[in-house]
Image: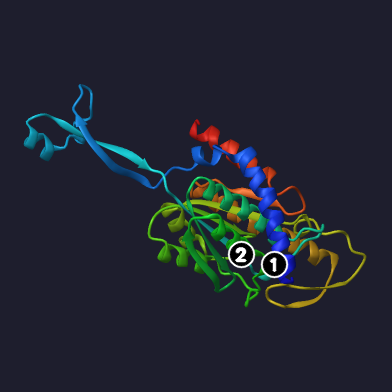
Amino acid sequence: MQTSDILKRVRQIEFKTGKLVRETFAGQYLSVFKGQGIEFAEVRQYIAGDDIRSIDWNVSARTGNTYVKKFNEERELSVIIACDVSASQYFGSKGNLKVEAAIELASVFAFSAIKNSDKVGLLLFSDKVELYIPPRKGKRHVLRIIRELLAFEPKSKKTDISLALSTLLRLIKRQGILLFISDFVDNNYEKSFKLAARKFDLIPVIIEDPLEFNFPKIPALIQIEDAESGVGGFITPRTLGQISQARKDVLTKAINLFKLSGVDYINIDASKNTLDPVIKFFKQRSRKLGV
């Protein structure tokens, strides 16, 4: 993609997602994502019914009156967008690649974050950490993230979810929101996923394409090649069905892990409207939190 094409696409994404954030997600993002915790604000005189655990004994002893500590929620969050850029993401059977759906989703969350004065960071991964941009504030920073998502050319084709998660656990010191976008075609990431779910408000996003689960009928042999491993050959209709079932099994395993870890997830069909599942996610989480 040429530089001029990238800038044009950035402007298109900024217009579309910025408008959506203003009209649809204004307020919802703020209500469904809590801040980092609490920070000390001031002391005030004790009122009957106050929790005695909040009494500031030092101030009370010094003044001769009973004072309690008052705290405010620390609103600022860090939003980390981790995006799978392995070869399987560059697939699409109906005009829209899985990675394009991922970019649109990432942009919505990034613009929602800066609208609420939160920081945004980016991790692109394959079976390597391809790129890491630390969390920062500001529209210019978000536009840089979108440019990287559009223009980045990964060095590797394979996937290592465990490496991506363990890297973020090491790099990000404070809790925050982790939007983890992948098709989850990988194994042996359960331990790092559970650790990440305990530290972050982890939101896994499954990006899929309908052709991965329902291959069309074929009359005889066809030749295929795995995008990540490069392994290929001729297969029969029966083998094609087995590949489809294997993909369904991988997805079922991932969803079971998400439920077991107590995390909300988003499932996106790259051939359909990317943002409908996001709107559904916000509404479901709002109901869940009673906001």
The reply, left or right, for residue 21 in relation to residue 172 is right
Mark carried by residue 132: none
Q: Element under label 1?
A: helix
Q: Is residue 36 above or below residue 216?
A: above
x and y percent of residue 63 in the render? 8, 33
Q: Observer-nearest residue: 196 or 257?
A: 196
Q: Element under label 2?
A: strand
Give yes or no for contact between labels 2 and 1 (Cβ–Cβ under 8 Å). yes
The reply, left or right, for residue 229 in relation to residue 178 is right
Identity of the residue drawn at 20% across and 21% down: 48
Where, quadrant-wise, is the N terminus in this rendering?
A: bottom right
x and y percent of residue 32 in the render? 50, 39
The reply, left or right, for residue 261 in relation to residue 234 is left
Q: Observer-nearest residue: 100 or 187?
A: 100
Q: Is residue 98 in view?
A: no
Mark carried by residue 84: 2
Q: Is residue 219 in view?
A: yes
Mark 1 is surrounded, within 10 Å at the Cα level, by few (under 14), some (14 to 19) or many (20 or more) other residues, namely many
Instruction: Please identify, in this view, whether the residue under mark 2 or under mark 1 is nearer the observer.
Output: 2
The amino acid type of the residue labelled 2 equals Asp
Q: Is residue 250 above or below residue 118?
A: below
Mark carried by residue 88: 1
Q: Is residue 94 above or below residue 155?
A: above
x and y percent of residue 75 in the render? 41, 44
